[in-house]
Amino acid sequence: MASSELKKNLEAEEMFLTEGLKSLLPHALRRIIRCNRLNIMNTSGIAEGYKQANVVILHKSLADDFEKFCHANEGPLPLLYRSKPGDWKCPSLSSDSDIRTDCLQYKIYEHGVCTGSLKSLREYSEQLKNMVTFYLGCSFSFEKAVQNAGIPVRNVEQKCNTAVPCYSISTFCCNLVVTMRPIPESKLEAAAGATSELKEAHGAPIHMGDPGLLGIQDLSKPDYGDPVHLHPGDIPVFWACGVTGVEAIINCRAPLAFTHSPGYMFITDLKNYNVTFRSPREVPQVHCISEDPLHYSIVSAEAAQKIKTLETLIGIDPGDRGIIHLHRQGELLKACLSISHAHSVLITTGFPTHFTYEPPEENDGPPGALAIAAMLQALQKEVAIVTDQRAMNLNKKIIEEAVQLGILKRPVPLLSYQSKSADSALMFLCENGNPRRPRFDHLIAIERAGMAADGNYYNARKVNIKHLVDPIDELFLAAQTLPGVTTTGVGDGGNELGMGKIKDAVKKHIKNGDVIACDVGADFTIVAGVSNWGGYAIACALYILSTCEVHDRYLRKAVGFPRLSNKMVWLSALPSVTKEEKLLKTLVQHGVRSGKTASLEMEVDGLPFYNTHSLMIEKLRETAQQ
């Protein structure tokens, strides 16, 4: 018989056997395993509805540190039970088990090296008297929940090492190991929802999209198991994996340790519970934040709704300029999810509206930019500001005084950009111009003059102010060619950098739009009644995301501890009326004028514009803190 035909017959036999094993109770399965009468490739899909466990057995002198390691990395290592030294049973997980015999196969590790596979540990009974067994949750346990959500389970998964470090405890340190399951794009949110509450089975995914973002270079070469083939429309989805414990055992170089063989889990008597009710704080939503590389993020329904409220608040149109036609729903959420994942952010602002004055800048833009920078600093992200060469001294003074006023924790690096050659933008954005080594992974333009289709820059009255504007647009155009670098534009009139994404609507609905519309787009476009409001909304949205447990877990890949202990630091970075009043006074002292000449007389909903402005900040803060 040909080898391919034999393989098909064996697979068919195993499928038939597995179907019969689905309905067997765990104690019966363990008895069969104990008698060495079961020949299957893995325990996926058997004892359906019951929890399965990864197993780590090590010397009692290492047990306390390993338990701490588990608690510090609960995504990959959800601890179900820790035995006493020499105890081969686990009464809270099963009634009649013996860990020496009740896994289909074991691995033995000596000084960090796997020295073989075993069907039983009975011959090591004497050594086991001084060893402790850890039972850790397994993703096989959530397969039924995934199936119930209408997601196909192929009973195949592959395990890959990542470049994501776990939180180290003493000698236990390693990178996270993940399992990958292909999920149809239309089912991503269902997959996250079905697994998010099953924390004892690794919980929600820790990554959706390009494996390279986890440091996995080739999905066709998994570190454990066989490669899984993606069908058209599938997205690779990654869950934390209990094999992380094996990597920790290898790295600690214990003289003697045992684990289950990957795929051959310990089957418990515990049933998987069904979650019947969850609050919006617990329900995950999935949003695509990048196409190149493909990247999805997760946020709770509650946090998403708060950010939607922020977007609605800033959307009012003082002066009825027609910006209501420019809004793109959901852009604030996607932009801020992208910024939340960023490590280094570059901000630009500056619109020389008052071209006959010195300085020609308006006061819409810098306050919003500094509000974003303050929150990014609080979140411990790298942030820099790029502006026109002629405005460097002015912006340096503003930043210094913002630090003195307590708006910024420390000075923000201030940069300028000049176009000297065809690759100037690439050299500015990337180390030595290497597209694979970008200095920034997100660019934000807020109330920054944007280049029109004819190459000029216009204020709202169609006056060409190109002679006052450095070509920072080139950075946004170059960013479009750099994988992993995303951009956001914030504006209130359509002639700002980043508004090219909505230029058709600007030309149709905004006065002089056919001339002034910015031609350079951004990945995300945030339109606000006043651009500063957009900056304040971004700062508030980043606060909301940081305090969202669902998003925080996804950001840290379910390793380490929740970052909510930093909440008071983030809270102090939120924009406030007092901060803005102080900053506006500083701008006035440096000769910066209002961008809205009629702002003192303008009314919005029957209130003077300034009162509306203060009320807007208060409402944004209130929404963020709800």
Image (cartoon, rainbow, N blue to C red):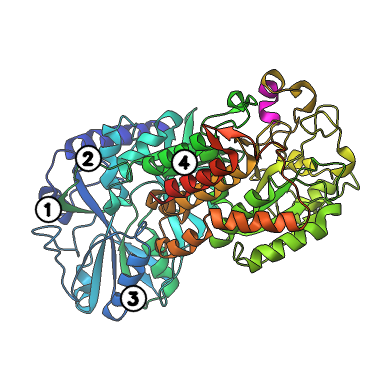
Of the numbered discs 1 and 4, the one sitting upstream in the chain is: 1
Q: Residues within 10 Å of mark 2 (few under 14, many from 20)?
A: few
Q: Are marks 2 and 1 in contact (CB under 8 Å)?
A: no
Instruction: Please tell me the numbered disc located at residue 65.
Output: 3
* Amino acid type indicated by mark 3: Asp
Query: What separation in Å lies between label 4 and label 3 (alpha carbons)?
Result: 41 Å
Instruction: Please tell me the numbered disc located at residue 277.
Output: 2
Q: Residues within 10 Å of mark 4 (few under 14, many from 20)?
A: many
Which residue occupies 33% across, 49% down? 203
Query: What separation in Å lies between label 1 and label 3 (alpha carbons)?
Result: 33 Å
Mark closer to the observer (4, 2) = 4
Mark closer to the observer (1, 4) = 4
Q: Which residues are magenta?
A: 500-506
Q: Is residue 621 visible?
A: yes
Instruction: Identify residue for label 1.
Output: 31
Place of residue 280 in the rendered image (x, y in percent of width and height, measured from the top left) = 32, 41
Q: Residues within 10 Å of mark 1 (few under 14, many from 20)?
A: some
Q: Which of the pair 131/466 is nearer the observer?
A: 466
**552 to the left or right of 485:** left
Of the numbered discs 1 and 3, the one sitting upstream in the chain is: 1
Mark closer to the observer (1, 3) = 3
Which residue occupies 32% across, 66% down? 71
Quadrant placement of the N terminus: top left
